[in-house]
């Protein structure tokens, strides 16, 4: 059965760390970083990248449009 | 020669708007200028030229429709009378701030407040000193006949687009309501959409092509230094208007000892006063303002070197007189006379005031 | 599989539309405005109409919408956006014209312009963000502030007896024959965003077909004004705003459905 693996890319400097993406993720991939970006925000990152299914929910709810989503099908 | 018609000033302005190739008129009824929109509705300019006419829900909405359409590169006009023009001031300030071309007509009635529906010239300050908030100016044309009501519309549009600035035609209840013979200008074609896109794509919201930056119509600039720079640019523009657009008419000023300064219907009344004065051997001339802003201050100042006094005649408690005094700069006496609140002064009253305040003084 | 193997252009499934500029949004973290902006621009992009779309920005938090939407835009005086949009649409009837307004702008100071543009059935789209508060001026009471809800001008809670009732503008304008599609949506979850985007698409399609005015209310959060973190604000919105401003279509194809 084909498996889908996803990944997100966060525009770290534009992320405001609002955290709206966290509950939007069905597989609990995202958390806010302990580190901060140039604006002082704890930015979103993939804490559990292997769980990402590339569903785009996080990107769709991200108010600042800082998340890009990728996915591949693997056999 | 164009078509000769007998028309009310308000009708002439409406017909002239169609013939000037205007794209739209947005207005709201108010006495004494309702004939403008009534005439347009009867004429169906949408069939004649494709011009849009819409009765808005308020003067506020009307001027904001003008703002939207003018920002989209179209030739747009609105008209109202004093209380309605007060309502429009917010929108006019935005239009001036965003540097949009449009024509606004004020057929002035007596105030303050709801005032009266009779003629007045008491909106001079509002018209020439800004009117709404912020440092801005309108270019103000003052017609004194039905013919000028017709002629000034096309000129006003040309000036509005030349400077990208709102132009005000400041009329009054006399000129708006009276009927005169008028030679109508020829019909000008409206610009096509392609022509508008070609001419105004550098600023108007006509739809962003991939090849250019987006156009934004706004008067907002949060950075005070940039806002100041924008203000300086506006001031520069107003200075250019002062250099290039001063318009006036001098009647019998060559040999005059005394000058009546007036505009609009007061200038017509003053002509009779002048005739009466001259019959009595008094050398009176008339300086009729056509542009109220820019004000012909240099010309009046020069005139002050060779006359004995000025009488500013206006249907107000004394507004234009302030500009006349600034121009005369104390060289000779300059006094005000006028009836107001809707009362029109007679030529005899003006002559009496001239004799008492200037000649006798 | 290495993440670098996944993050490649050919595997991209979602990124911000190019009709949103790269300017950082001036909105507070978690504010629904950004999402509403983005899906509006996604619709314009997907319909291929960006060269013919003119937006009208309001006064309020989204006054700078023109900094973020990469199309020709006009910024209107407070509350006047529907009149400004009317002016544009009447002289460019083939263009797509929309307003983007908040609740103070649309329901308070612009009530009259809203009502009459809707009643005339102007062929425009109105996107109405309702967060129950004046955000930009610092959290004052809006016409949509809930009963008992605290704001800087109702510091002890909105008192209905003296401050009046929250205004259901969307239900009100749905009664007017000029409106063709009236709906209330939200952008707090991925499912809600997708649904709202469908509604916006429908609204622009209605404009294309010249059927009348399409009005989309988006109930949204104001975590700064409500003094909550973004996630809590969304939860509070579900528990408190939605009962008073229930989501769903109100008028479809010119017929009331609620």
Image (tube, coloured by chain):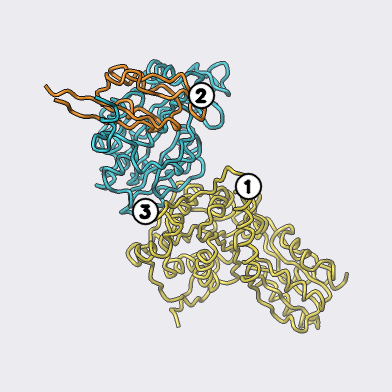
Of tags 2 and 1, which is closer to the observer?
Answer: 1
Q: Position of residue B287 (x, y in %)?
A: 71, 74
Establish if B162 lies above or below C214.
below
Q: Is residue B157 visible?
A: yes
Chain C: colour as depicted = cyan
- The residue where tag 1 is placed is B225
Image quadrant assignment for residue A73: top left
Of tags 3 and 1, which is closer to the observer?
Answer: 1
Q: Position of residue B353 (x, y in %)?
A: 80, 68
Establish if B256 lies above or below B49.
below
Q: Which mark is residue B207?
A: 3
The residue lying at 47 percent from left, 61 percent from top is: B36
Q: Is the residue marked by circle 2 packed among few (<14), some (14-19), or many (20+) residues within 10 Å?
A: some
Q: Is residue C177 left or right of residue B242?
A: left
Could you say whether the residue bearing mark 1 is in a helix, strand or loop? helix
- The residue where tag 2 is placed is C224
Q: Position of residue C237 (x, y in %)?
A: 41, 20
Q: Separation of disc 3 and disc 1 at Cα?
A: 30 Å
Q: Separation of disc 2 and disc 3 at Cα?
A: 35 Å
Could you say whether the residue bearing mark 2 is in a helix, strand or loop? helix
Q: Is residue C185 visible?
A: no
Could you say whether the residue bearing mark 3 is in a helix, strand or loop? loop
Same chain for mark 2 and mark 3? The answer is no
Chain A: colour as depicted = orange
**Mark sitting earlier along the chain (3/1):** 3
Q: Is residue B168 left or right of residue B64?
A: right
Image quadrant assignment for residue B108: bottom right
Disc 3 chain ID? B
Disc 1 chain ID? B
Image quarter where the C terminus of chain C lies is: top left
Establish if B205 lies above or below B333.
above
């Amino acid at each position: 059965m084909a498996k889908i693996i996803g990944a997100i890319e966060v525009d770290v400097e534009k992320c405001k760390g609002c955290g709206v993406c966290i509950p939007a993720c069905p597989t609990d991939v995202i958390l806010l970083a302990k580190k901060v970006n140039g604006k002082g925000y704890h930015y979103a990152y993939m804490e559990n990248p292997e769980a990402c299914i590339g569903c785009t929910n996080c990107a769709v709810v991200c108010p600042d449009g800082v998340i890009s989503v990728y996915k591949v099908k693997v056999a | 020669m164009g078509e000769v018609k007998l028309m009310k000033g308000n009708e002439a302005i409406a017909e002239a708007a169609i013939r000037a190739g205007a794209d739209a008129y947005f207005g709201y009824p108010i006495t004494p200028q309702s004939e403008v929109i009534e005439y347009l509705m009867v004429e169906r300019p949408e069939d004649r030229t494709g011009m849009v006419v819409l009765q808005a829900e308020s003067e506020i909405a009307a001027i904001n429709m003008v703002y939207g359409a003018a920002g989209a590169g179209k030739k747009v006009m609105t008209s109202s009378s004093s209380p309605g023009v007060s309502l429009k001031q917010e929108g006019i300030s935005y239009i001036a701030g965003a540097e949009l071309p449009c024509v606004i007509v004020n057929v002035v009635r007596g105030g303050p407040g709801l005032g009266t529906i009779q003629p007045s010239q008491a909106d001079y300050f509002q018209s020439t000193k800004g009117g709404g908030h912020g440092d801005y100016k309108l270019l103000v044309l003052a017609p004194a006949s039905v013919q000028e009501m017709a002629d000034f519309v096309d000129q006003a549009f040309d000036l509005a687009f030349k400077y990208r600035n709102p132009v005000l035609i400041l009329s009054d209840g006399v000129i708006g309501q009276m009927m005169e013979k008028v030679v109508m200008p020829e019909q000008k074609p409206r610009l096509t959409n392609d022509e508008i896109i070609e001419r105004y794509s550098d600023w108007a919201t006509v739809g962003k092509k991939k090849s250019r930056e987006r156009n934004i119509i706004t008067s907002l600039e949060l950075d005070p230094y940039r806002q100041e720079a924008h203000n300086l640019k506006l001031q520069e523009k107003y200075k250019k208007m002062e250099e290039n657009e001063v318009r006036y008419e001098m009647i019998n000023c060559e040999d005059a000892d005394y000058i009546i300064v007036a505009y609009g219907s007061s200038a017509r009344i003053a002509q009779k006063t002048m005739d009466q004065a001259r019959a009595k051997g008094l050398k009176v001339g008339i300086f009729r303002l056509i542009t109220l802003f820019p004000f012909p201050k240099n010309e009046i100042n020069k005139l002050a070197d060779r006359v004995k006094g000025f009488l500013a005649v206006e249907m107000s408690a004394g507004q234009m007189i302030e500009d006349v005094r600034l121009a005369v700069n104390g060289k000779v006496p300059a006094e005000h006379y006028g009836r107001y609140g809707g009362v029109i002064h007679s030529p005899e009253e003006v002559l009496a005031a001239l004799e008492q305040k200037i000649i006798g003084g | 599989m290495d993440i670098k193997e996944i993050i490649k252009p050919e595997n991209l499934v979602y990124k911000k539309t190019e009709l949103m500029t790269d300017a950082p949004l001036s909105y507070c973290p978690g504010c629904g405005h950004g999402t509403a902006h983005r899906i509006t621009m996604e619709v314009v992009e997907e319909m291929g109409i960006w060269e013919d779309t003119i937006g009208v920005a309001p006064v309020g938090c989204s006054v700078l919408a023109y900094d973020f939407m990469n199309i020709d835009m006009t910024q209107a005086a407070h509350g006047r956006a529907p009149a400004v949009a009317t002016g544009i649409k009447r002289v460019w009837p083939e263009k797509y014209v929309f307003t983007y307004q908040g609740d103070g702008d649309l329901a308070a100071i612009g009530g009259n312009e809203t009502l009459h543009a809707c009643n005339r059935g102007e062929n425009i789209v109105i996107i109405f963000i309702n967060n129950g508060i004046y955000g930009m001026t610092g959290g004052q009471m809006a016409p949509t502030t809930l009963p008992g809800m605290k704001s800087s001008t109702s510091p002890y809670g909105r008192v209905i007896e003296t401050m009046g009732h929250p205004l259901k503008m969307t239900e009100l304008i749905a009664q007017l024959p000029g409106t063709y599609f009236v709906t209330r949506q939200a952008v707090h979850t991925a499912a809600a965003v997708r649904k709202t985007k469908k509604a916006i698409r429908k609204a622009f399609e209605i404009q294309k077909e010249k059927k009348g005015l399409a009005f989309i209310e988006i109930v949204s959060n104001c975590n700064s004004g409500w003094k909550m973190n973004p996630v809590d604000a969304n939860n509070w919105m579900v528990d408190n705003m939605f009962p008073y401003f229930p989501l769903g279509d109100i008028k479809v194809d010119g017929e009331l459905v609620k």
